[in-house]
Amino acid sequence: MATDKSDISGWLVRPANGYLWAALVVLLGVLAVHAVRVTSDGGMDNAIVVDGARTWLAGGAPYDDPHFLYLPSAVLAAAPQALLPRSVLDVLVPPAVTAALVLGWVCALRLHRVPLRSRLAVLGLLGLVAGFAPFGQLVRLGNWTVTAALALPLCLLLASRGRWVAAGAVVGVAVALKPLLAPMALLFLFARRWRALAVLVLVPSVASASAALLLPDPMGFFTRTLPFLLYGDDPFVRLYEASPAAVLPRLGVPEEPAGLLALLAAAAGVVCAYRRWRGPGPVPLRLAETSAGLMLSVFLVSRPSYNHYLLVVLPLLLAGLPYAGAVARRPWFWLALVPQLPGVTWPWLESGRRRAFKDAVTLCGLAATVGWHCVRGAREPDGPREAPGERRPAVESA
């Protein structure tokens, strides 16, 4: 990592002033308090999971709700919330989501060996909170995507230190709560970490199978949820989906060609991610960019695919900014984020239900930028390539 005075990295890794930290704390507090005031049940998306748990506790089947798109293990995980009064959830969930996002950012910084007192630590999080609209949306919705936003950087931090089995367990737990990180199995496949891959698969499988036995409809996920994800048509949900498979039909492209195009783009993204894993550069950077390439590729084809999914990969890429060869130093990375600036009204997209067009531009722009970066390869500014699991010394702050 370049940290000399002639490079921006040197400025980024030096300690931040107190007023920047004060501004960050105030901004995070304002965001959480606002979410507490405007949400119920901790947010609309959290309410879906909690209502599923309440239905189960009342003797019903959670999968009767077509919007319950989680594994059976999530029902048990949400049960403690279902026992709490709704007014308590209103107060607890938004700060908890905010704290989880902050912890995810901390893990991303530690993955790249960036000091937690650095300017990048505070300015990067300030940028996410104030300059990236999905951050506030995720806090208000209380969506369980936050589990993946915390689990992925924690997984990669463990993997960078050689603790691959623990990393697999972290991803497995996250998948048991929400299957968003299931594509990360490919990273363990690329790295040939078979024991860790086995743990990743077994944790959600055992948890879901055990939980399913307690449900009145044990096969509901396979008989109801999977068909809905593959073939369902929900007019409300489709308005907010950002994947090309959902957006192109709204522009007049037939569904079959749109789905095929998205699938081909996703396959190309996976190939690019594999090239990045096999390419040069420091291990933390390769871990972050390979994982981002895999997840963005899946977001191109997954149904549903929302803009707050980007918070799973964006902190990982942003925290790598001090590396001279990082994708976050490419101008197209920043241009792709422009549609997500809060408070900007785009012509013909004023309606919230047309937001998916902006989200699709950001998703496709980021996927293309990361894919091209993976193929082209990153420069190797820090000496010889490390073997997976080697620890790099922490960056010293001036």
Image (cartoon, helix red, strand yellow):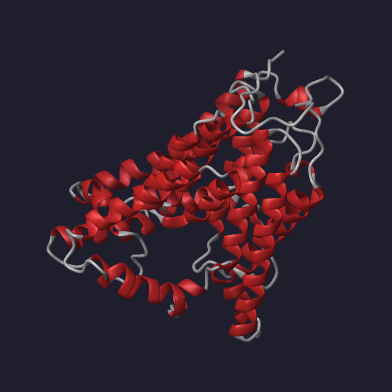
Camera sees residue 44: yes
Q: Residue 166's x, y, as percent?
A: 44, 35
Viewer-closest of 334 and 354: 334
In which quadrant of the rendered view does residue 116 lie? Answer: top right
At x 81% / y 50%, what residue is drawn? 376
What residue occupies the far right of the structure in this picture? 6
Q: Residue at x 69, y 63 (%)?
A: 268
Image quadrant holding the C terminus, namely top right
Residue 290 vertical placement versus 263 (above, below): above
In this view, the residue in front, 110 or 201, is 201
Tell me which corner region of the image, top left, top right, bottom left or bottom right, holds residue 218.
bottom left
Residue drawn at 56 percent across, 25 percent down: 22
Up-down relation of residue 18 to residue 294 (above or below): above
Question: How far from the left and from the top, in percent, is residue 255?
Answer: 59, 83
The residue positioned 64% from the left and 55% from the top of the image is 340
Point out the residue furthest to the top here. Answer: 398
Count of picture labels = 0
Residue 112: quadrant of the picture? top right
Q: Is residue 68 left or right of residue 383?
A: left
Q: Can you give x and y, in whole percent of width and height, for residue 390 in the image?
A: 62, 26
> Can see residue 361?
no
Q: Is residue 311 left or right of residue 88?
A: right
Would residue 73 be found to the left or right of residue 236 on screen? left
Quarter of the image where the N terminus is located: top right
Residue 94 locus on image (x, y percent)? 39, 44
Q: Tell which of 15 and 194 is nearer to you.
A: 194
Asked whether, in this view, residue 220 is left or right of residue 237, the answer is left
